[in-house]
Image (tube, helix red, strand yellow):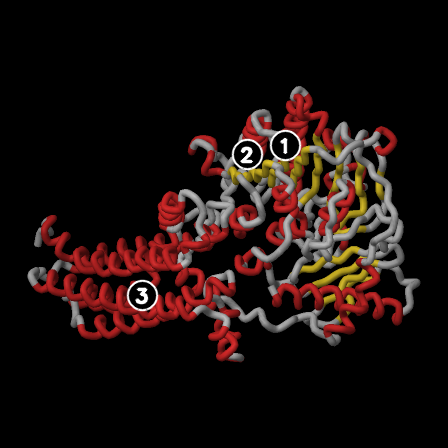
Amino acid sequence: MKMTKKKTHQILYFPLGYYLIWFFLAWIDRFLFFISHFSKSTESAWKALFFSYLYGLKLDLSMAAYICVLPFLFYGTYFLITGKRGEFFPLKIYTYAVALLYIAISIVNTAIYKEWGMKISNRVVETFLETPQATLASSNVKHWLLGFLFFVLLIFYIHIAWRFLRRSINKNTVEILPWYWRMSIFLIAAFLLFTVIRGGYGRAALNPSVAYHSSNSFYNHVAVNTHWAFLKEVTTRNIAENPYKRFSKEEAAQRIKPLFETQGAYERMLTRTDINVVLIVLEGFVGDLVESLGGEKGVSPHMEKLIEKGVLFNQVYAASDRSDKGIISVFSGFPSQGDESIIKHIPKHEKLPGITEVFDSLGYATSFYHGGQSEFYNFKSFMLSHGVDKVIDQTDFKPNEVKSSWGVYDGLVFQRMLKDLNQEKEPFFSSHFTISNHEPFELEGDYHFGKNTAENKFRSTAYYTDSVLMEFIEGAKREDWYKNTLFIVVADHGHRLPANWNINDARRYHIPLLFFGEVIKPEFQGLKVEKIMNQSDLPGTLLAQLGIENRRFPWSRNVMAEDYQEYAFYTTKGVLGVKTPQQELGYDQEGEIFTRIVNDVSSESENLALLDTAISYYQTVYEQFLAY
């Protein structure tokens, strides 16, 4: 039997209409939330609301698709087998049950937002279950009353929309289609549903960061689909148990307290403090790529030229082995949380301090450049919620400029950054997180070291990034703002390549940190700081050099202080490490055994005491992560 366009329309009319019911429910919910907290808005509020709808679109589409999954599986399978629609009564029960849950979440979200400053989350639910009276007391009666009004409005919407759709379907009858048409329709619908749920097929799976678009947190919260974000949180694993817990909170805090009391005198390396800052975060740039760090010769020759007139911190260790941990360590001075990652939890990472918001508060123009998707690992939401005025990512480039699987090559992003900074009002703080030195190590042109092995591809992409970094610096030298700018080069994390270090080896976490620019005093140019330090010590050290108080960064030390104690900590899944001038330890938490002891001269008791310090460090870090 030949299938007609009319019959196709009749078949798709109901599922499409049902999907739109939930899609527009999200739009109504967003508007009601917005007007409930309208006092948090600023000028051009209605324009901001429009952009909240625009940037929240993917999450709205995805949430509606999630709700439609069960009806699709049940009715789609029934249609595939029988060619008929099936009874509507079970779907009616499902629709009203989900609607009641959906609206309940909306009401609670509206009621608690003003006092909590965050949308509904696991933390809200857990707090309510533990102390329901206190939770209710922290909300506003007016918002509960508004919630009741919203309940009536939303239930009325669901009821009318369902009845309208149901009556429309009753007017149409559809003949049974051949099995191959039914199979085609089922597979196409399944593909579309999955695509909408995931938000496309880019590197970054859909996450709340895609809705972040403003430096005003309220507008970002309006844009994020409440129910999508809550669903994501409740379906992720439980993070409430501290995997490092060994001591009481007080004992753990006391064990590490002396390490962070760096209040001693220190020398200022800069000629002045009213300067621009350009921060370059290099993807996966392990110390083995830098000759001055004991690495291979010729992989980063241009960085060597910068080192000759800069200040090189040559004993820096990354917080962990992934970008999500490294970005937080660099910008917030907050250590890694092992298996967990605070940047994935927007309500938590919004509470972190950030060097960008420090400069923003001082009147600096702030910007962040990234050749990939800035929604990846919630980078965009972190930057926008921490005082960054402008986030530039691959969406700001032409489609034909996105040539690698990760996005736009570093050279093109550096060119865009230089062009923008030439027009930027001083002072400014600008950062660029590169991508080209990331697996699968792609280059459009020549592979300097060849591409016959993963190691050589890695060396080649590192050489490319080193080259375009130098082109950026040389371009900046021709501009007036150059002489008043401090350039900082650091890596987000190290890498197993090219030497294939084990995950418990400190050399895998060894990374460069370089200060460079004419604002560095002549007597400090060419200096190599030999102190063992963490990547997270960058904010504390930088702010001290600029004479800015840094108490908001309790985990970030001023490495140049006379009383600084040399410790470096690093951790990833199931493994933690600690390095001091006397010892380097690797420890497997699951097996509860040392996997690396470098100095055999140290006694067992000394090693155990150092391990206790590392455990105390991560226990306290994780406690703070939970508290955020």
| Residue closer to the observer: 9 or 363 | 363
Q: Circle 2 — which element?
A: loop
Q: Are marks 2 and 1 in contact (CB under 8 Å)?
A: yes
- C-alpha gap between disc 2 and disc 1: 10 Å
Q: Secondary structure at mark 1?
A: helix
Q: Amino acid at mark 3?
A: Phe
The mark tally for this picture is 3
One can see residue 569 in this view: yes
- Quarter holding the C terminus is bottom right
- Comparing 532 with 55, the one in front is 55
- For numbered disc 3, what is the local secondary structure? helix
Residue type at mark 2 is: Tyr
Q: Position of residue 510 (x, y in %)?
A: 75, 48
In this rendering, the label closer to the viewer, 1 or 3: 3
Taking depth in this image into account, of 518 and 591 the one nearest to the observer is 518
Instruction: Indicate which disc, 1 or 3, sits on the residue closer to the N terminus.
Output: 3
On the image, numbered disc 1 is attached to which residue?
Answer: 464
Q: Which label sits on residue 409?
A: 2
Point 68% across, 50% down: residue? 496
| Residue 627, image quadrant | bottom right
Alpha carbon separation for disc pair 3 and 2? 48 Å
Q: Where is residue 309 drawn, in percent x and y?
A: 80, 29
Please give the residue where the numbered disc 3 appears in the rendered image: 150
Look at 73% across and 54% down and name the residue there.
551
User: How far across and down, in percent of the image, does residue 142 sit?
Assistant: 39, 67
**Which of marks 1 and 2 precedes in the sequence?**
2
